[in-house]
DNA sequence: CTTGACCTTACAGTATAGGGGAAGGTGTAT
DNA sequence: ATACACCTTCCCCTATACTGTAAGGTCAAG
């Protein structure tokens, strides 16, 4: 199977497939006499795994680590379980930040509905935005 | 006021201040005879505004647009109000994505607690991660 | 023999918000 | 005279996940 066929079967671009190989996520496939990449069927499973991992918020770097375990003959499950815990913590933190931001934005929208633009003092650029809360999160 | 003093007063680096100037967020200050940037007091208000804007999730590009209104003699409030609406929508969407991801991660963690790594089939890399839900979000 | 589809490598660019460091000028104190 | 802190511009680097483009090789059909 050449790279174009693999790409259309997995709905990736050939660019992305070569990129994954360069990043160590896909093993280098055999080559045809002409130098074309020649994939086996199991490449599709690898790619499915990568996309599934991305869908749950794993980076390609993290997926590379997981795949490295498997390619070294070890089950990566323990490592994966730890990563899942870590991701869950990160996501919870991020949600908390965004909820706080959401509340701040709501306050600002309320103010926008009551303040008169004509009274906006030029030296502050815009009276709607003013240092107020130590909000840490940015999207 | 030279750039170093402005930097320490605003708790920014001189790098960041020059960067803001290059991005059109700060007007080019006067120069001393020796070519040093010489800031007026109002530069501090501008920088406070920029940091406040960042804190509510505005990008430097968006802040540049807002500042451009003010520098053209117009109150940016209407534009800002629209941006706040847009940001609120984005944040709400992002939160929804992350909550969905959080639920998915929770399911996977439950599975991790019950599956035996020894039974993990090598061809799938790790049985904990498998295409399942069309989750769109990635942090 | 040529066209066209497909493949190759390699370099550059996207967006975001700066940080690192070089090479050199300025200003004040000793 | 020279040490030292501070300033200047300039270019490259960071992380993430690719996409775009150039220049050229491979392969089957007409």
Image: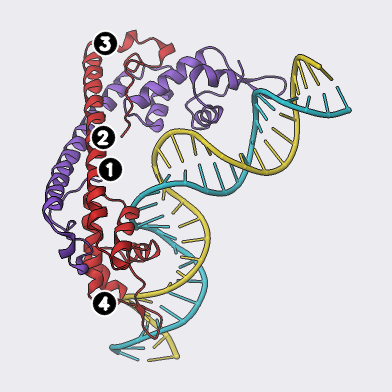
Chain colours: A purple, B red, C cyan, D yellow
Residue A4 vs C26, above or below: the answer is above
Q: Is residue B57 visible?
A: no
For residue A139, the mark is: 1
Q: Nearer the viewer, residue B96 or B5?
A: B96
> Are dots 4 and 1 on a single chain?
no
According to the image, label 2 marks what residue?
A: B94
Task: Give the distance between the C-alpha atoms of the residues marked 3 and 1, in whole angstroms.
Answer: 35 Å
Q: Residue at x 22, y 75 (%)?
A: B41
Label 3 packing within 10 angstroms: few (<14), some (14-19), many (20+): some
Task: Give the distance between the C-alpha atoms of the residues marked 2 and 4, in whole angstroms.
Answer: 40 Å
According to the image, label 3 marks what residue?
A: B115
> To which chain does the residue with label 3 belong?
B
Task: Give the distance between the C-alpha atoms of the residues marked 4 and 1, in whole angstroms.
Answer: 32 Å
Query: Relative to B7, is C8 on the left or the right?
Result: right
Residue B77 vs B115, above or below: the answer is below
Callout in the foreground (4, 3): 4
Q: Are marks 2 and 4 in contact (CB under 8 Å)?
A: no
Q: Are marks 3 and 2 in contact (CB under 8 Å)?
A: no
> Are dots 1 and 2 on a single chain?
no
Q: Is residue B32 visible?
A: yes
According to the image, label 4 marks what residue?
A: B40
Label 2 packing within 10 angstroms: few (<14), some (14-19), many (20+): some
Count numbered badges in the picture.
4
């Amino acid at each position: 199977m050449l790279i174009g066929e693999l790409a259309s079967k997995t709905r990736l671009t050939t660019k992305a497939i070569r990129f994954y190989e360069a990043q160590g996520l896909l093993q280098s496939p055999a080559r045809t006499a002409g130098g074309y990449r020649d994939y086996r069927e199991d490449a599709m499973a690898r790619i499915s795994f990568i996309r599934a991992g991305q869908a749950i918020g794993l980076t390609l770097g993290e997926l590379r680590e997981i795949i490295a375990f498997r390619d070294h003959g070890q089950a990566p499950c323990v490592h994966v379980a730890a990563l899942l815990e870590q991701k869950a913590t990160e996501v919870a933190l991020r949600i908390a930040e965004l909820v706080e931001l959401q509340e701040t934005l709501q306050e600002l929208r309320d103010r926008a509905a009551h303040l008169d633009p004509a009274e906006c003092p030029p030296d502050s650029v815009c009276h709607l935005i003013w240092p107020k809360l130590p909000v840490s999160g940015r999207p």
